[in-house]
Amino acid sequence: MENTNNLKIYTLDQAKDKYIGKLGSEKRDKYEYELRLDLLGEMIKRTRKERNLTQTELGDMIGVQKSQISRIERNAKNVTIETILRVFGALKAKVNFNVELLDGEFRIA
């Protein structure tokens, strides 16, 4: 943290530590997990647009309604891995999942 003219300047990591919690804390883990899901939805949206597909067209390709694609793009929290894989399959995009066991807990990175 740097202090200039009574203004405190933090790096992004310092701000996260201070306002969200240290790495490994429950609150920080939840934040990082939700951020990844938001990024996943954004990746789907960006890839869909790069492929010049509408939400309706992508939904038709995997057998779901346009509203389901819209929900996935906005918030991928309540979506099954199977649906995510079908979406990326329809988009002809390669998907890699990283799975780690930390302290006996199952987590997907």
Image (cartoon, grey):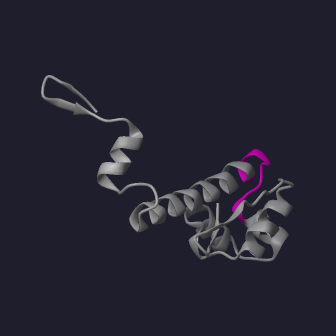
Say whether residue 49 is magenta: yes
Camera-side residue of 73 and 21: 21
Q: How many marks?
A: 0
The quadrant the C terminus occupies is bottom right
User: Where is residue 37 drawn, in percent x and y?
Assistant: 58, 62
Look at 61% across and 61% down and name the residue there: 73
| Region rendered in magenta | 48-55
Q: Nearer the viewer, residue 11 or 42?
A: 11
Query: Residue 54 appears at what percent x and percent y?
Result: 73, 58
| Quadrant of the rendering where the N terminus is positioned | top left
Residue that extends furthest to the top in the rendered view of this protein: 5
Asked whether 53 falls inside the magenta stretch, the response is: yes
Is the residue 17 above or below the residue 8 in the image? below
Q: Is residue 1 above or below residue 91?
A: above
Q: Quadrant of residue 65?
A: bottom right
Instruction: From the top left corner, tell me how far across and down residue 4 is, in percent.
Output: 19, 23
Where residue 18 appears, as percent x and y from the top left, is 30, 50
- Which residue occupies the extreme front position in the image? 103
Q: Quadrant of residue 20?
A: bottom left
Q: Residue furthest left?
A: 6
Question: Depth check: 15 or 45 in front?
Answer: 15
* In the displayed structure image, the side of residue 6 where residue 61 appears, left or right: right
| Depicted 45 relative to depicted 68: above or below | above
Which of these two is toward me, 18 or 68? 18
